[in-house]
Image (spheres, helix red, strand yellow):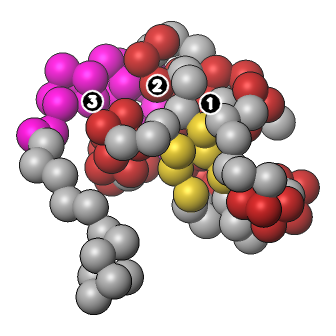
Amino acid sequence: MEARKKVVRRECRRDEALLCKIVAARTGERAAQTILEKDFCLVQAALEADSVVVSLDETAREAYRAAAQGVGEIGDIVWVNPAQEEDGPIEWLKSGAMPEKSRRLSVGQR
């Protein structure tokens, strides 16, 4: 990917204010807070780029989905797990990887 110039590198600073807001949305849930802090780079990259996260981590997706209920800035992020057959990742990619509403974090718990 690097050799074919398909990787775009962007400079971005960690948005501590947004991270604090996200973590605060899960006050009292230390395990969830740890996950949110660990995977914040995925969310921040999505916000800086195309609003899409592709990750195998269902625990992180559920933690961010719950946090999105109180943090509007991350609600429109589309999260797809390529290992989850019900996500239909191959079909989604073949059809252009459109930001379908049903894939957004703001949609709520599965």
Q: Quick check: 2 left or right of 77?
A: left
| Disc 2 element | helix
Disc 1 marks which residue?
A: 105
How far across and down, in percent of the image, does residue 78 sit?
Answer: 60, 38
Task: Give the residue at x 42% y 17%.
Answer: 73
Q: Residue furthest bottom?
A: 3
Disc 2 marks which residue?
A: 74
- Which secondary structure class fits the magenta region best? helix
- The one of 36 and 95 positioned closer to us in this rendering: 95
Query: Where is 7 relative to 13, above or below?
Result: below
- The one of 56 and 59 positioned closer to us in this rendering: 56
Query: Where is 12 relative to 100, above or below?
Result: below
| Disc 3 element | helix
Disc 3 marks which residue?
A: 19
The region drawn magenta spans 13-34
* Location of residue 37 (image quadrant): top left
* Location of residue 57 (image quadrant): bottom right
- State yes or no: discs 1 and 3 in contact (Cβ < 8 Å): no
